[in-house]
Image: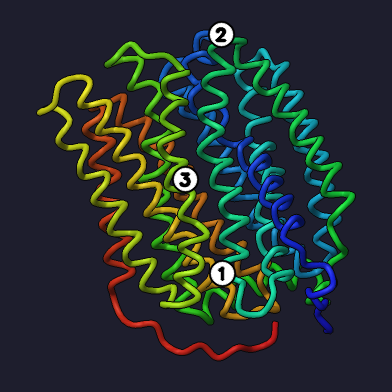
């Protein structure tokens, strides 16, 4: 089928709006992390029950990516983005009114599913990008997405400490609704790249996974990095409360440190365009592993030194993780441009399976053996990602139609 010409609709301000939309939507799955102690106190939850909230949200995100993202190759992405935006705003509002743990878990899953509109926005930006600037354009939108991930913790921690966790989710509902209205006004229509039926689209996911070894390597490496990332952020607020008697506002404040790493996304995209994405992924995975390994030094430092080291580590591993993610996306999108939605679905399904496993395993290990066990999990996961990226060489890819 004919693909749309991006030139008439590309404009930097449209990409900026898409970046904001990606950030607001993906933030919905991370607001809970610094709020877990507040939610646990309100609903009388233990540590493992609190850990189920981010686990189910991230599992929902993985399910939404796998089963909904391929629709972007078959339907107008603009309609998909706006439909999910409306559903997400409504769910966030309902979430803020929940008083039962089981209902909270069910809505957490649905929030994760609808928040995948962020992953519809990223390939849409790649379509609009001018020739030779795909990496930079994707990196710009990913900056918005990644700042949404990281600053969501800061904002929710501060708002939660001042007004309670319910107000935070009400504010989130308003923010998603407002950016949805703006995107409705500015986004162009997108021509479908495939005429496959939904069952055929889903079947083609298996074919794409089997066809491209580089897709499998990218997904698995980023998935293991995500285990480390999620284990840290899902347990940080509880650890700070237990060991340092610090509240949700301080836990959220560490998101500012992590946000410094997210600012590397456009740089990583530009480096991937110039130097090759594979090299960027290797360096990113190494940086993640080293940054987490630094936290083994915590017992040797005074309290203030420990808190500073955690912040430095957060900057380092977020820088490495986001650089690796943008480079992996660049690799994956280049495999088969007509199947960007499905390739993105496969990559991020594995990423958020890693996120869910990191939340679940990190919370369980923290309950059993404390913070050193969480750090060990993060270092081991990062080391596996390094091994995956260093093993073998990238082979030339033959582009085919799907």
- Image quarter of residue 218: bottom left
160 versus 361 height, above or below = above
Secondary element under disc 1, as helix, strand or loop, is helix
Q: Sequence order check: which comes first, mark 1 or mark 3?
A: 1
Is 373 situated left or right of 190 in this image? left
Q: Using the numbered discs, state the Cα–Cα distance from disc 1 to disc 3 in whole angstroms.
A: 24 Å
Q: Find disc 1 in the rendering and name its residue.
A: 135
Q: Sequence order check: which comes first, mark 2 or mark 1?
A: 2
Residue at x 27%, y 52% (from the top left corner): 289
Q: Find disc 2 in the rendering and name its residue.
A: 42
Query: How far across and how far down the image is residue 287, in percent?
Result: 29, 55
Q: Find disc 3 in the rendering and name its residue.
A: 355
Q: Using the numbered discs, state the Cα–Cα distance from disc 3 to disc 2 in whole angstroms.
A: 25 Å
Residue at x 57%, y 78% (from the top left corner): 334
Image quadrant containing the C terminus: bottom right
Image quadrant containing the N terminus: bottom right
Q: Callout 3: few (<14), some (14-19), or many (20+) C-alpha neighbours within 10 Å?
A: many
Is 295 situated left or right of 10 in this image? left
């Amino acid at each position: 089928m004919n693909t749309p010409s991006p030139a008439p609709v590309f404009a930097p301000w449209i990409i900026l709006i898409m970046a904001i939309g990606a950030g607001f939507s993906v933030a919905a799955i991370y607001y809970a992390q610094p709020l877990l102690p507040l939610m646990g106190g309100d609903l009388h939850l233990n540590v493992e029950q609190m850990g189920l909230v981010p686990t189910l949200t991230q599992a929902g995100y993985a399910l939404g990516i796998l089963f909904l993202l391929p629709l972007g190759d078959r339907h107008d992405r603009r309609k998909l983005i706006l439909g999910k935006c409306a559903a997400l705003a409504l769910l966030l509002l309902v979430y803020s009114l929940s008083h039962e743990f089981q209902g909270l878990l069910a809505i957490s899953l649905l929030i994760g599913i609808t928040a995948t509109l962020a992953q519809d926005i990223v390939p849409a930006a790649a379509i609009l990008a001018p020739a030779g600037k795909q990496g930079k354009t994707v990196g710009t939108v990913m900056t918005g997405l990644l700042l949404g991930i990281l600053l969501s913790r800061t904002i929710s921690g501060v708002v939660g400490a001042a007004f309670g966790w319910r107000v935070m989710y009400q504010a989130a509902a308003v923010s998603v609704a407002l950016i949805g209205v703006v995107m409705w006004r500015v986004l162009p229509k997108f021509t479908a790249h495939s005429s496959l039926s939904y069952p055929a689209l889903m079947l083609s996911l298996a074919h794409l996974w089997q066809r491209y070894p580089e897709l499998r390597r990218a997904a698995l490496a980023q998935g293991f990095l995500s285990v480390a990332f999620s284990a840290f952020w899902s347990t940080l607020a509880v650890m700070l409360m237990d060991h340092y008697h610090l509240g949700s506002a301080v836990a959220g404040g560490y998101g500012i440190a992590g946000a410094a790493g997210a600012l590397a996304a456009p740089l990583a995209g530009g480096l991937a365009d110039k130097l090759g994405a594979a090299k960027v992924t290797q360096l990113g995975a190494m940086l993640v592993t080293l940054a987490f390994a630094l936290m083994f030094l915590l017992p040797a430092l005074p309290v203030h030194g420990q808190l500073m080291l955690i912040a430095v580590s957060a900057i380092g591993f977020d820088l490495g993780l986001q650089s690796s993610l943008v480079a992996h996306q660049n690799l994956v999108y280049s495999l088969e441009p007509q199947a960007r939605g499905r390739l993105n679905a496969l990559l991020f399904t594995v990423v958020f399976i890693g996120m869910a496993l990191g939340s679940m395993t990190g919370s369980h290990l923290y309950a059993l053996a404390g913070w050193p066990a969480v750090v060990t999990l993060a270092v081991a996961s990062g080391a596996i990602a390094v091994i995956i990226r260093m093993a073998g060489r990238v082979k030339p890819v033959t582009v085919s139609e799907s």
